[in-house]
C-alpha cells in the first residue's frame, strides 16, 4: 500500500552515464515533484509537474529532465552524470498546494 | 527569495521532557507551512500541515503554531520519547504564481532523546 514509491532505492554508476529514476504515486494526486538532498542534508526543489505544466527550479542543469507518462508517474532522467550529482533524490506528490507526501528516496552515487 | 532557518541545529534532551523546535522564514507571504520528520537513511514523514488561514495544528503529542506576520513557526513536542529522535524539517509554500507549489526547506533540527 505504498503511497509514493521510487525505484531504484540505490543507484551506483560511472561519470558520463545516463540514468533514470522512476516515481509512482497511488494517491490520486495531481501534482508531483522532485527534490534533491545534498551531502549536507539540505533539501531543494528541482521540479514540480501539474496538469502538464512543468515548473523548473532555475538552478537545475538541463541534463536533468522529468518525464510524466501519466498523472501517477513522474520519472527523472539524468544525462552525462557528474560527481556532483551524487545525492538522495526524493519524489513527492500532492493535490495542488495541499500536504505533500514523499517517497523513500533514491541514493545516487556517481563514481 | 524565501529563506527558512531552523534553530537549534541540534538538540539533546532527556526522555519525558517537553521541547520546542523553532522555524523562521523571511517572506511572510506564504501559503502553507509543513513540518516533517526524517529518520537516518529514510524518507520524509509529514507530521503537520498548517494552512495559511490557520494558526496551529495538533496531532497527538505534537502541536505546531504559525505566526505569519512575524515569520515564525514552532513545533512543540510533549513528553518526548526516544522514538522521537530524528531530524525535524520545516518547509514553507511560497504564495501563488510560478513556483507556488514548491516547498522551501530549512536545514532541520536534529533531535536526540536520551532514555
Image (tube, rainbow, N blue to C red):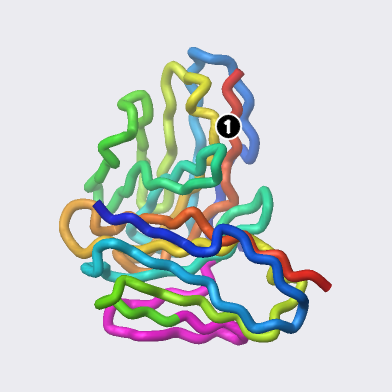
Asked if residue A63 is positioned above or below residue B20 in the image, the reply reads above
Of A104 and A85, nearer the camera is A85
Question: Is residue A55 shown above or below A30?
Answer: above
Dot 1: chain letter: A
Name the one closer to the observer, A72 or B11: B11
Q: Assess whether residue A93 is covered by the magenta stretch.
A: no
State left or right for residue A70 relative to residue B12.
left
Quarter containing the C terminus of chain B: bottom right
From what the image shows, is residue A106 above or below residue B77? above
Residue A13 image position (x, y, % from top left): 60, 20
Q: Which residues are magenta?
A: B46-64
What residue is rendered at 54% in x and 35% in y? A87
Residue plotted at (41% across, 44% down): A74
Which is nearer the eye, B99 or A38? Answer: A38
Q: Residues within 10 Å of mark 1 (few under 14, many from 20)?
A: many
Q: Residue furthest right?
A: B115
On the image, the x and y values in percent for residue B73 come to 41, 74
Residue drawn where x is 46% and y is 42% of the image: A36
Image location of residue B76, percent across then percent down: 55, 81
Residue tagged by mark 1? A108
In this rendering, would B21 be left or right of A55?
Answer: right
Residue B34 in percent (x, y) is at 43, 69
Task: Say which quarter of the image contains residue B18.
Answer: bottom right
Residue B91 image-quadrant placement: bottom left
Q: Secondary structure at mark 1?
A: strand
Amino acid at each position: 500500500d505504498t503511497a509514493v514509491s521510487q525505484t531504484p532505492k540505490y543507484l551506483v554508476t560511472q561519470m558520463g552515464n545516463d540514468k533514470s529514476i522512476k516515481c509512482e504515486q497511488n494517491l490520486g494526486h495531481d501534482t508531483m515533484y522532485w527534490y534533491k538532498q545534498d551531502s549536507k542534508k539540505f533539501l531543494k526543489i528541482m521540479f514540480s509537474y501539474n496538469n502538464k505544466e512543468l515548473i523548473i527550479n532555475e538552478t537545475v542543469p538541463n541534463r536533468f529532465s522529468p518525464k510524466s507518462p501519466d498523472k501517477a508517474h513522474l520519472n527523472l532522467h539524468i544525462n552525462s552524470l557528474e560527481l556532483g550529482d551524487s545525492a538522495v533524490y526524493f519524489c513527492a506528490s500532492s493535490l495542488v498546494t495541499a500536504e505533500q507526501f514523499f517517497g523513500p528516496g533514491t541514493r545516487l552515487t556517481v563514481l | 527569495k524565501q529563506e527558512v532557518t531552523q534553530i537549534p541545529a541540534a538538540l539533546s534532551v532527556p526522555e519525558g521532557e517537553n521541547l520546542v523546535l523553532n522555524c523562521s522564514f523571511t517572506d511572510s507571504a506564504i501559503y502553507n507551512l509543513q513540518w516533517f520528520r526524517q529518520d537516518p537513511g529514510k524518507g520524509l514523514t509529514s507530521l503537520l500541515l498548517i494552512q495559511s488561514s490557520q494558526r496551529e495544528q495538533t496531532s497527538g503529542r505534537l502541536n505546531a503554531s504559525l505566526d505569519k506576520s512575524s515569520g515564525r513557526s514552532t513545533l512543540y513536542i510533549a513528553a518526548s520519547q526516544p522514538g522521537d529522535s530524528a531530524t525535524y524539517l520545516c518547509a514553507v509554500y511560497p504564495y501563488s504564481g510560478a513556483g507556488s507549489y514548491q516547498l522551501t526547506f530549512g536545514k532541520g533540527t536534529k533531535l536526540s532523546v536520551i532514555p
